């Protein structure tokens, strides 16, 4: 795992964007890259930087496939707070990803069994696309990854999950009161997320500091679902100073981030 610390949210967005693009170049086997997409406030700057890369000719997402991390259960995908609509507005319209190439878990069906079947099919569709090359991630204040709340199985696949009370409280600002926030969702599982070629997690603000410290330096535990990043061979965590304040190994992360060209590789 690499931990990269930016001096501001703007620098975090630039660092994260560079790592997404580098990850796509390394992991994508063909002309149609597969990008895992997260919602929330933390990745917004990253998407703006990816848009800048498109405008400058350094990236092209017109033939890319995008897979969302999660979706609410019980609201149609045309609802303004559905994650499909959010991603259409905040990602597709920003980086030039085709709406037809955006895949989102199914949160509306006639039965729980139908939603569960669609969740299994969602994992299959990711595999059919060749797997996710780079998965963009945020982190909840309780350490959730996607909507894998504390207690989630570390090898879980895409499935139905109940949202934790504090998650619903955090998201209530997007709805007309907490009573309108859905209680359940469909989310990629932690095992599904770990299948991606590269993980790029973005976090800004002091409200994420405890979760980042637990995810990066704490034990691997279902109590902090984001700690599964420690199991991934190509995970990049990009945070600002406020989100990094709980890290005990800060000096090492700063040293490790130095350009490898500073190394003296002379055999002695």
Image (cartoon, rainbow, N blue to C red):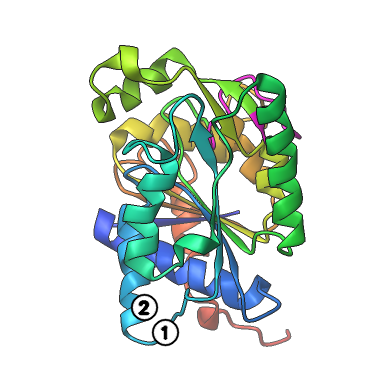
Main secondary structure found in the magenta portion: loop
Q: Residues within 10 Å of mark 1 (few under 14, many from 20)?
A: few
Magenta stretch encompasses residue 180: no
> x%, y% of residue 263?
57, 79
Residue drawn where x is 35% and y is 47% of the image: 42
Q: Is residue 12 visible?
A: no
Residue drawn where x is 74% and y is 33% of the image: 117
Give SS at disc 2: helix
Give SS at disc 1: loop
Mark sitting on residue 53: 2
Q: Earlier in the sequence, mark 2 or mark 1?
A: 2
Vertically, is 265 above or below 75?
A: below
Residue drawn where x is 46% and y is 38% of the image: 139
Q: Magenta residues?
A: 145-159
Vertically, is 249 above or below 112?
A: below
Magenta stretch encompasses residue 157: yes
Question: Which part of the image, by quadrant, shows the N terminus?
Answer: bottom right
Counting the numbered discs, the total is: 2
> x%, y% of residue 118?
69, 37
Q: Is residue 216 visible?
A: yes
> Badges 2 and 1: C-beta atoms under 8 Å apart?
yes
Vertically, is 118 above or below 266?
A: above
Vertically, is 6 above or below 146?
A: below
- Residue beneath disc 1: 58
> x%, y% of residue 164?
48, 17
> x%, y% of residue 122?
68, 45
């Amino acid at each position: 795992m690499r931990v990269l610390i930016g001096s501001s949210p703007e620098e975090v967005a630039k660092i994260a964007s560079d790592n997404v693009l580098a990850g796509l170049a390394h992991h994508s086997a063909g002309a149609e890259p597969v990008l895992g997409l997260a919602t929330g406030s933390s990745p917004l700057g990253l998407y703006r930087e990816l848009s800048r890369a498109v405008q400058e000719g350094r990236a092209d997402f017109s033939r890319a496939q995008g897979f969302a991390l999660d979706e609410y259960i019980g609201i149609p995908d045309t609802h303004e707070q559905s994650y499909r609509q959010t991603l259409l507005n905040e990602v597709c319209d920003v980086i030039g990803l085709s709406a037809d190439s955006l895949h989102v878990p199914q949160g509306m069906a006639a039965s729980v069994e139908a939603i569960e079947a669609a969740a299994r099919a969602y994992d299959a569709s990711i595999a059919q696309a060749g797997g996710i090359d780079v998965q963009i991630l945020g982190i909840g204040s309780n350490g959730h990854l996607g909507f894998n709340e504390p207690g989630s199985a570390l090898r879980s696949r895409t499935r139905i999950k109940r949202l934790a009370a504090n998650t619903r409280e955090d998201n209530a600002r997007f709805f007309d009161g907490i009573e309108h926030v859905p209680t359940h969702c469909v989310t990629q599982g932690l095992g599904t997320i770990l299948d991606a070629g590269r993980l790029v997690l973005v976090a800004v603000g002091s409200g994420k500091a405890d979760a980042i410290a637990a995810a990066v330096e704490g034990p691997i535990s279902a109590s902090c679902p984001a700690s599964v990043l420690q199991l991934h061979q190509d995970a990049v965590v990009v945070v600002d100073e406020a989100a990094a304040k709980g890290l005990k190994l800060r000096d090492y992360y700063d040293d490790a981030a130095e350009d490898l060209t500073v190394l003296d590789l002379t055999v002695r």
